[in-house]
Structure formats: structure tokens, C-alpha cells
Image (cartoon, rainbow, N blue to C red):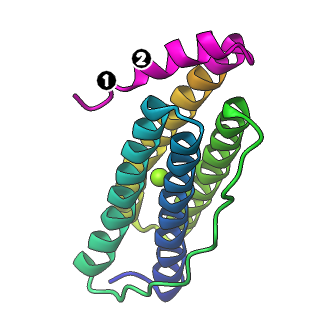
Amino acid sequence: MLSKTMQDALNEQINKEYYSAYLYLSMSAYFESINMPGSAKWMRAQYDEERAHALKFFDYINDRNARVALKTIEQPAAEFASPVAVWETVLEHEKKVTGSIHKLYEHALKENDYATQSLLKWFIDEQVEEEKNATLMLERFKSGGNQPALLLMLDGHFTKRGE
Ligand code: MG
């Protein structure tokens, strides 16, 4: 059985993962609006990934015979200054998520909750990937600068994600 404080903390994390999903879906709409379908598709795939993260916590709480509590999802930004600004936001956001996963892990260590530690190890590794990818994308878009031709070429490259 999960402790009440761990249950509450994991429920908070479900909400954060859904907020991530919502943020990336909003970014997908932004990219659609500026005619960058490759980047829009990329963000939509991120949206799916974040929902899968939320469900991993959801399933885990149920598996431990604890109780899921779904909360209000905060409204994400709808407009962004530029594609580069989007990737800056992604990197910042993922760093914040890494911080909250690490806090959960510290919590699980304090409680000697080995099962939750094991679950969180997957997320710790996942966050290394998320930050790596966000950094790579940000650097690529920065090097494209505001040159429309380069940005469109970059965008075309991303249409292949998930195929
Ligand atoms: Mg996530």
C-alpha cells in the first residue's frame, strides 16, 4: 500500500503529465497555424507520449491499491513568439518536470518505498532523453534562425517522426 503522502504526490504528477500533454498539443496547433506541419506532427507525438506517462502513474497507483484523483488541468499558452521560442519553452518545461520527478524519488527514498523508486527510475531515464531531445531541437532551430527557407527544410525533416 502506498502512503497517503506518496499517493497525493503521484496524483500531482499525473496532473503535471497531463499539463505537459496539453502544452504540447497547444504547440502542435501553433505550428499548424504557421504552416509547419512537420513540427506540428512532432508535437502531437509528444502529446501522445505525455498521456502515456500520465497513464503509467495512473496504473501504478491502481496497482498499489491506492486511489487516483484527477485534478483540473491548467490552461497552456496558445501563442508563441517564434519556433525557437517554442523549443525554449519545451526545454524549460522538461527541466521543471525533471525536478519534480527527482523530488518524488527523494520522497520514495525517505519512505523506503522501493516499488515507487523502481517506477521512478524509468522516469529519471526518460527525462534524460526528453532534455537531450529538447536541447537538440532548440539548437537546430536556433541555427535555422529566422530564415524561412531553412526553417521549412527543418520542418520537412520532422514529418517522418513515427513512420
Ligand atoms: Mg512526461
Q: Is residue 2 above or below residue 131?
A: below
What is the chief secondary structure element of the magenta stretch? helix
Q: Tell whether position 159 is magenta.
A: yes
Q: Residue at x 51, y 42 (%)?
A: 32
Identified by mark 1, the residue type is Lys
Q: Quadrant of the C terminus?
A: top left
Q: Which residue is mark 2?
A: 157
Judged left or right of residue 129, residue 103 is: right
Please tell me which residue lies in front, 151 or 108: 151
Per the rendering, the mark at residue 137 is: none
Question: How many neighbours does mark 1 have within 10 angstroms: few (below 14), some (14-19), or many (20 or more)?
Answer: few
Q: Residue at x 23, y 76 (%)?
A: 63
3D distance between C-alphas at marks 2 and 1: 6 Å
Per the rendering, the mark at residue 160 is: 1
- The spot of residue 152 in percent (x, y) is 54, 18
Residue 45 quadrant:
top left
Q: Is residue 27 above or below residue 60?
A: above
Q: Residue at x 26, y 71 (%)?
A: 59
Judged left or right of residue 120, residue 134 is: right
- The spot of residue 110 in percent (x, y) is 56, 67
Please tell me which residue lies in front, 58 or 149: 149
- Residue span colored magenta: 139-163
- The spot of residue 97 in percent (x, y) is 60, 53
Disc 2 + disc 1, Cβ < 8 Å: yes
- The spot of residue 15 in percent (x, y) is 51, 72
Please tell me which residue lies in front, 114 or 137: 137
Residue 2 quadrant:
bottom left
Question: How many neighbours does mark 2 have within 10 angstroms: few (below 14), some (14-19), or many (20 or more)?
Answer: few
